[in-house]
Amino acid sequence: MKKLPIFPPITNACGILSYLPVFEYLEEIGLKNMGAGVSKSSGPMEKLGNINPTVYWNGNVLMNSFALPSMEPEDFEKELEQYGGKIPLILSHYGNSPEDYARSVVRFDKYGIGHEINISCPNFEPGEKSVMKAMCNTEKGVGVIKAVRGVTDKPVITKLSPNEDYVAIAKAVAQYTDYIGCGNTIGPGLEIDPYSGYPILTGKFGGLSGDAIRPITMKMVHEIYQAVGDEVGIVASGGISKSEHIISYARLGASIFQIGTVLRGKNSKETVEFFNDLWDGVENILKELKKKSINEIIGENHVK
C-alpha cells in the first residue's frame, strides 16, 4: 500500500470546498489542520451538471443533485498550473469508461499527490444514464482501477458507495488500489414540494449526506476493514462533525477522514476554525487515551 503523505489525515470531501482558489484563500486566513485538498471531479469533457436548485437541507440530511459538474480538462489544467497553495492536492476523477479515467489520471498526474477514483456518484441529470452506477460493480470497477493503476505510481483511492455490494468490490480491487473510500452519498432520495407537487431538486433525486448517515458509513468501514484488513487503507467520509467521530472511525479501521456536510452554512473564517479545532480535539482525546498517534488505534476495536 502506498500511503498518502498527509498530516493531519483530514481532507475535504469531494464537491465541498473543492475549488483551488478556495484552498488558497482558506490557507491565507489561517487554515492549518487540513492535510490535503480533494479537487472537484474532473472528467473527459466539460459537464454542466444540473441547474439550481441542486441542494436541499430537510433538517436532518443534506440532499444534492449536482450531477458532477466539471470544467473542460484544458481549463482545469490551467488552474492546476496556477495553483499557489501549500495544501497538497488529491485529484478526483470520473469517466464513462476505464480509458476515460486513465487518460484523466495521466494528464493531471504531476499536479497531485494522489488520485481519488469516483465510480459511485448516485445522482445525474434528468434523462442521463447513471454511468457511475454502472461502474460501481465488481467487474467494471476492477476494470477502471486496473486501468488507473497501470498509468500512475501515486496512491489511488477507490471511492465506493454504500448503495452497492461494496465488500465484493473492495476485495476485487484491493490488489490494485491503495485506499478504499467509504463512501459516497447514499440514496438517492426524493423530496417534493407539498403545494406544487414538483420535486424540490432540479435533478429530481438527490444523494443524502450528513450526520444521519454516519452509522451507515461506519458499518461500511467496519465491513471493508474486516474484508481487506491492512491490505489497503480506508478513507472515511460520512457525517463527521466532531473529533469523537474521527476517533470512532479510526477504531473501526479508517486512517483518513473527509469533511463535508458539517460545513453547511459556515463562512470562511468558521470553516478554518472548524478544521483547526477538529484535529486539535483529536489530539486531546489521544492524550486522554495515552496514545502517541492515531495510528495506534486504527482497527483496534473493529466490531467482531
Image (spheres, helix red, strand yellow):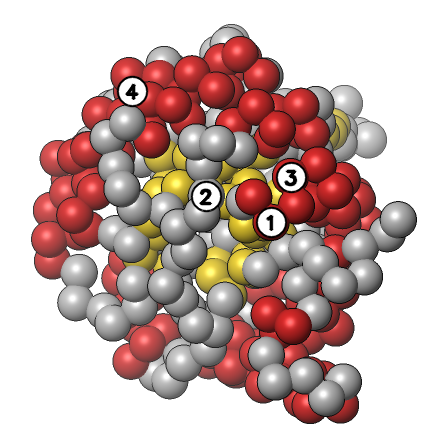
Residue 208 visible? The answer is no
Question: What secondary structure is found at the residue carrying circle 3?
Answer: helix
Contact? badges 3 and 2 (CB < 8 Å): no
User: Could you tell me how far apart the alpha carbons at marks 1 and 4 are, in whole angstroms?
Assistant: 29 Å
Contact? badges 1 and 4 (CB < 8 Å): no
From the top left corner, tell me how far across and down residue 98 is, in percent.
Answer: 35, 17
Q: Residue at x 50, y 67 (%)?
A: 9
**Which residue corresponds to mark 4?**
100
**Which residue corresponds to mark 3?**
228
Question: What secondary structure is found at the residue carrying circle 4?
Answer: helix
Which quarter of the picture shows residue 70? top left
User: Could you tell me how far apart the alpha carbons at marks 2 and 4 are, in whole angstroms?
Assistant: 20 Å
Q: In this view of the protein, which residue sits in the foreground, 187 or 7?
A: 7
**Which residue corresponds to mark 1?**
230
User: Could you tell me how far apart the alpha carbons at marks 3 and 2 are, in whole angstroms?
Assistant: 11 Å
Q: Residue at x 40, y 66 (%)?
A: 6
Which of the marked residues, 1 or 4, is nearer the chain's N terminus?
4
Amino acid type at circle 2 is Asp
Eye-nearest disc, 3 or 4 = 3
User: Could you tell me how far apart the alpha carbons at marks 2 and 1 are, in whole angstroms?
Assistant: 10 Å
Number of residues whose C-alpha sits closer than 10 Å to that of mark 4, classed few (under 14), some (14–19) or many (20 or more) = some
User: Could you tell me how far apart the alpha carbons at marks 3 and 4 are, in whole angstroms?
Assistant: 27 Å
User: Could you tell me how far apart the alpha carbons at marks 3 and 1 are, in whole angstroms?
Assistant: 6 Å
Which of the marked residues, 2 or 4, is nearer the chain's N terminus?
4
Q: Residue at x 64, y 79 (%)?
A: 282
Q: Is residue 240 above or below residue 94?
A: below
**Which residue corresponds to mark 2?**
178
